[in-house]
Image (cartoon, coloured by chain):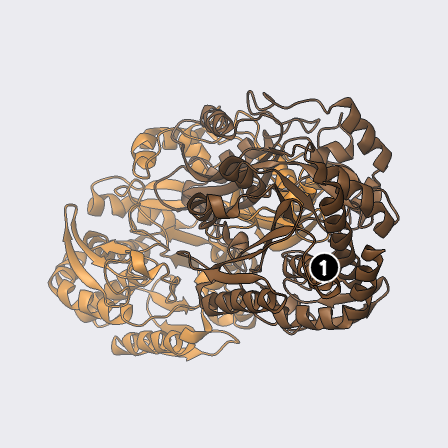
Chain colours: A orange, B brown
Amino acid sequence: MSLDAVLTRIDDDLPNAIERLLDLLRIPSISTDPTYKPQCSKAAEWLVDDLKSIGIAAETRETPGHPMVVGHVEGDGPHVLFYGHYDVQPVDPLELWDNDPFDPQIEETAKGQVIRGRGSSDDKGQLMTFVEACRAWKAEFGKMPCRITFFFEGEEESGSPSLVPFLEQNKDELKADIALICDTGLFESRVPAIITQLRGLLGEELTITAANKDLHSGMYGGVAMNPIRVLSGILANLHDENGRIQVPNFYDGVPELPADIAEQWRALDFDHSAFLGDVGLSEPAGEQDRSPIEMIWSRPTAEVNGIWGGYFGDGFKTVLPSKAHAKVSFRLVGQQDPHKIREDFRAWVQSQLPKDVEVEFSDHGASSAGHMSTAHPAFEAARSVLGAEWGHEAAFAGCGGSIPVAGYFETILGMDSMLVGWGKDDDQLHSPNEKYDVESFHKGIRSWARVLDAISTKA
Amino acid sequence: MSLDAVLTRIDDDLPNAIERLLDLLRIPSISTDPTYKPQCSKAAEWLVDDLKSIGIAAETRETPGHPMVVGHVEGDGPHVLFYGHYDVQPVDPLELWDNDPFDPQIEETAKGQVIRGRGSSDDKGQLMTFVEACRAWKAEFGKMPCRITFFFEGEEESGSPSLVPFLEQNKDELKADIALICDTGLFESRVPAIITQLRGLLGEELTITAANKDLHSGMYGGVAMNPIRVLSGILANLHDENGRIQVPNFYDGVPELPADIAEQWRALDFDHSAFLGDVGLSEPAGEQDRSPIEMIWSRPTAEVNGIWGGYFGDGFKTVLPSKAHAKVSFRLVGQQDPHKIREDFRAWVQSQLPKDVEVEFSDHGASSAGHMSTAHPAFEAARSVLGAEWGHEAAFAGCGGSIPVAGYFETILGMDSMLVGWGKDDDQLHSPNEKYDVESFHKGIRSWARVLDAISTKA
């Protein structure tokens, strides 16, 4: 059987595939820091060369930011677009890394071999699982299993400023039957998960101003309002004692979970004790009348992502500050309207201000929740073959994070996306000592071979 | 009359006195920054030389930190110790200064001439009012009005680490009949104020820890406890809706204001609208059943002086932080026991922590409230003569700040302190563009001449 030959070839070529990934990981393509602009271009060029080496017509395409990589290859059957990103997060605090983040190493650990380095999981390692599957297929059959467009971005970790204009300008070239996105993980580090729900994200920053300058707390303490006191009061009111968010109308458009999805999720038997235990916690902190898996996949949230005001250096300063600040984000689900929620949040904050105190807001973006239609036959095709690779039947799952590119593919290109990936919960994404299990990489490549086979023959 | 001759001499010599002060202000004696250690020594030497120039046996005295300046001069009548400090606060943010903070200038303003520069008010300008009064007295009479010990510190702005050991080691040398401290201001920038109540200060830092590392709010948001949420809740509970502090037993030892002091303070007719209006506020924010003057002088406070956690750079990061921090201080009055309050505060914080969440505290010092006995005749002597200089009868006043040296003089040397000074509310102490009015300097010198005369003849 032809697929078996491809899988054997993948197994045999694994050491070379790892070497290629290490090569890519050595390029410090940190997109948010302008210092690394040449390295971002270098990573894009590396990918172009690698795609060309397996017969794909690829090139970099300039943007006002970092280049896109676009490649095309013909094939029979459906036309798929594969998306990944070659840029990585910054590495600070550097002192928390056990090794140079851009000198990737293969490490033996209690849980097996891992590839350690920035980008190993997010997203260079994941991206390369697809490329390696294509390489093996080409080597075995001299052609690809279907028509494929490769589309790699270099600004995913810095807000993708060039993405929407690029999609708008290249609609016809990029539109395919379906997009495949490899930037997510296994459920509980073991069950292949096809993401069908993504939470949206609304970011707000607020600055509370009381006095018109910093005051001395000896002179003014007791009579002048402290903006940190006001801010704390507002943030303490964000949730009630049951974890419910108290911004008026916030739950408008939040759906109950459909019975079939609820049943599937129950069947996953999510071990929230292990999930929380990994990070030193035990108690689910969200809405107390919801299950932990709903809390992370299908319920909206409000989080303070940053707070600052007054003096926070070493020692002590008896300042009574003029201003206090917070960054607040909301994860959104269902039909929640981010723009309406922004308005309601701002009005709710205003309503809590005492006399003399003012607030300013700034907008840190908004995206609605995503809902994947599973109507395209690729979904069922993928679901039917992944179990053989991982020993667990694949699940249609939710994802607590926000992957805006899937929304753009839908709204700009009119194309559904299938999100599937091989990351594990302990990959340390965006953190020091990021890693990708060799198992994720190896089985990930094999998984793509299976999915491409299923899509090309069944879809 | 002899005093008149001294006052005339002071008037005539004012331009020279200003030049001497400018000379001292040019020395950047920032005590908290080790870079400026030589400049601190230079300021101490400058003072020794200046004291010697008016016949005072002065010298620097080494400490593990910056040197003390000690000078002695004989005279008839009571023995007074004069305290001031020659060190200054750091100057950042430098960009908010209109001029070099260490290139002091005489400026014409709508409210009259000011001396602009770091330390002009706090405390070099104030300290020199006393020295200039002595200089004029010496010039006029060839001797001092009484026996005087001069004692200048160079670490007041960095916590006075060497002060207590130095007092312990030099008790006999430094003990006098009364200490005069010039580091406070006029009431409402116009009424000479002799401080008889000083609030104590208790500093605490707390760190709330939830997860054992920073988390991604997409992956964990909704299920993992956010320490900023916990911290906000605790800080929001510090005050009830009437501004009363809710730490258990906090008000133990807080006295009601004695009727005679209450009457004196009412007579001062404090214009809190102007005091708050100067900094853009209007509403007294403390205990709502107390008068504004009580809020700043005789009632205890709780203030958050700093708060930080999560991400607070530019842009946005959807981090769900592991830790959140705050610096909290309490101003204490009466017999409030700082050590007991520290314990009660810590227990109260602990009692509000949800499961999985921990707190660590660190101690940023504690001092009890100070109460000056006005029994020493110097108090009445000073009060009787200051009205003639300022056009307002002097008041026995409270001070919201904490001046620990007065407490040390009492406990270590068994000596009362009289705190009187000429600063104005808009002097910008510890802030950019610090200034001292030429009026404060000129009338301050004349005031000391009057007080010395009164003390030497009446006390």
Q: What's under tag 1, amino acid-wise?
A: Ala
| Position of residue B177 measured from the top left corner of the image (x, y, whole percent) | 61, 41
The residue wearing badge 1 is B133
| Position of residue A428 measured from the top left corner of the image (x, y, whole percent) | 32, 51
Q: Secondary structure at mark 1?
A: helix
Q: How many marks?
A: 1
Vertical placement of residue B10 versus A440, above or below: below
Quarter of the picture holding the C terminus of chain A: bottom left
- Snapshot quadrant of residue B104: bottom right
Q: Is residue B247 shown left or right of residue A382?
A: right
Vertical placement of residue B184 versus B235, above or below: below
Mark 1 is surrounded, within 10 Å at the Cα level, by few (under 14), some (14 to 19) or many (20 or more) other residues, namely many
Q: Nearer the viewer, residue A369 or B252?
A: B252
| Position of residue A59 measured from the top left corner of the image (x, y, whole percent) | 39, 79
Vertical placement of residue B132 versus A359, above or below: below
Residue B380 seen? yes
- Snapshot quadrant of residue B298: top right
Residue B191 seen? no
Residue drawn at the location 56% of the way across and 25% of the way down? B247
| Position of residue A331 measured from the top left corner of the image (x, y, whole percent) | 52, 43
Q: Is residue A351 shown left or right of residue B86?
A: right
Q: Is residue B47 shown left or right of residue B293?
A: left
